[in-house]
Image (spheres, rainbow, N blue to C red):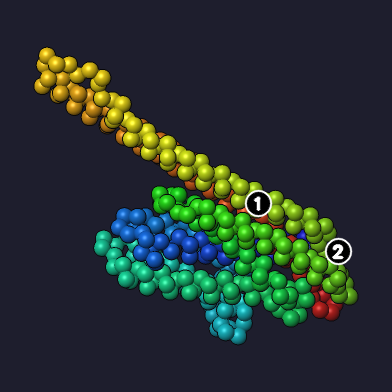
Amino acid sequence: MTGFATAFGEITLVLFTTLAPSGAAAYLIMGLPVLTGRATGEDARRLNRLTCLPLLIAMAGLIASATHLGNPANALYVFTGAGRSPLSTEVCCAVAFLALAGIFWLYSFAEEPRRWLQRALLGAIDVAIVAFVAAVAYAYDVDTIITWSLPLVPVALVLNALVGGPLIALVGFAAARWAAPWRLLVALSAVAAVANAAVYVVLGGDLAPLANELASVTRLVPSYLAWVAAFAVLVFAGVAVAWRTGRHAAGGKEGAGQMGAAGPASAAPADIGTSAPATAKATAEVGTKATVEATDKVAVCFSRRAGRRVVAGYSTAALLALAGVFIMRFVFYMTHLTLGLGV
């Protein structure tokens, strides 16, 4: 007897707890340049519009969890338990976050959006995000489920969000062509990954002796440490890919800048001549202009190709990290063990 059947039966909640917290954390990170005033004008417009990326990821997780209700009409009853039921509080926080984020995204298409209103909306969204992630983390703290009512369980989920969120944010920043502090974001994901792996190892020690009259955790989740190892391999592979992508992107920008700077200078003729200075000068200007235009076209093509490679690299990193998080969320539902005669 193992917990595979239980986890597969809760696969929609596995997807929800994998995608939604990371998407919410990525949204918060992507909004910081606009919230702090570092991004203005067209840069802010691109960032605001591309917040749809983490928003869609979070929405995908929420939609997956809604299918767990069986009958969609039951969703209306969820809101009546807000404050009393942890699950209802979780859903209400999610709806508040998604509603505010949707309004903000639509407002980003205004011809002359007011900066103070955008900042106010972003501040409210960030508060909703923090409340949402905290609500998800503590929604499963149920006394009757002895394997979930442990102090490190909510800590693990918060760290999951900090592992995937920065990498998803890097995808959005790259697509928006915003020079994000990629080293800081990759380092944040790496530190969270180390802490997350350590928490899972310690949590495994807390789970091992737990059992009831029908089953034990060691039977429900055989080879727990192997699952943790798979998590670590995937997550650190994602961090490594993100670091490599950032290094290549930084090198590519430097190369493009050098190419653009050297182009016009190298196009100047070596010997203009002295017998017809006016003609020689006109010829030099025409040649220089043509060379500058050709160089600009090459730089633009190079930038677009490099940009697509950067987005693809960060996307790969985020997918690897989310795959690792998915594994341990699956294990979490495998450990479902209640008090008394039940699993």
Q: On the image, which quarter does residue 340 sit in?
A: bottom right
Outermost top residue: 275
- Taking the image as shown, residue 136 lies to the left or right of residue 174, namely right
Image point 51% across, 46% down: which residue?
246
Dot 2 surroundings within 10 Å: few (below 14), some, or many (20 or more)? some
Residue type beneath disc 1: Phe
* Residue 30 % position (x, y): 45, 60
Q: Position of residue 11 (x, y in %)?
A: 67, 61
Q: Which mark is residue 236?
A: 1
Is 149 situated above or below 189? below
Residue at 47%, 44% in the rendered image: 250
Image quadrant where one finds the C terminus: bottom right
Image coordinates of residue 284 in percent, x first then y, are 20, 24
- Mark number, residue 13: none
Q: Identify residue type, mark 2.
A: Arg
Q: Which mark is residue 219?
A: 2
* Image label count: 2
Residue 144 visible within the image: yes
Who's the residue at 33% across and 35% down the image?
A: 261
Q: Residue 267: percent from the left, percent from the top?
A: 28, 25
Q: Is residue 331 left or right of residue 102?
A: right
The disc, 1 or 2, on the residue closer to the chain's N-terminal end is 2
Q: Quadrant of the N terminus?
A: bottom right
Q: Secondary structure at mark 2?
A: helix
The residues tagged by marks 1 and 2 sit, at their Cα atoms, a distance apart of 28 Å
Viewer can see residue 294 = no
Single out the residue that lies furthest toward the right. 213
- Residue nearest the viewer, comparing 98 with 205: 205
Classify residue 304 by image quadrant: top left
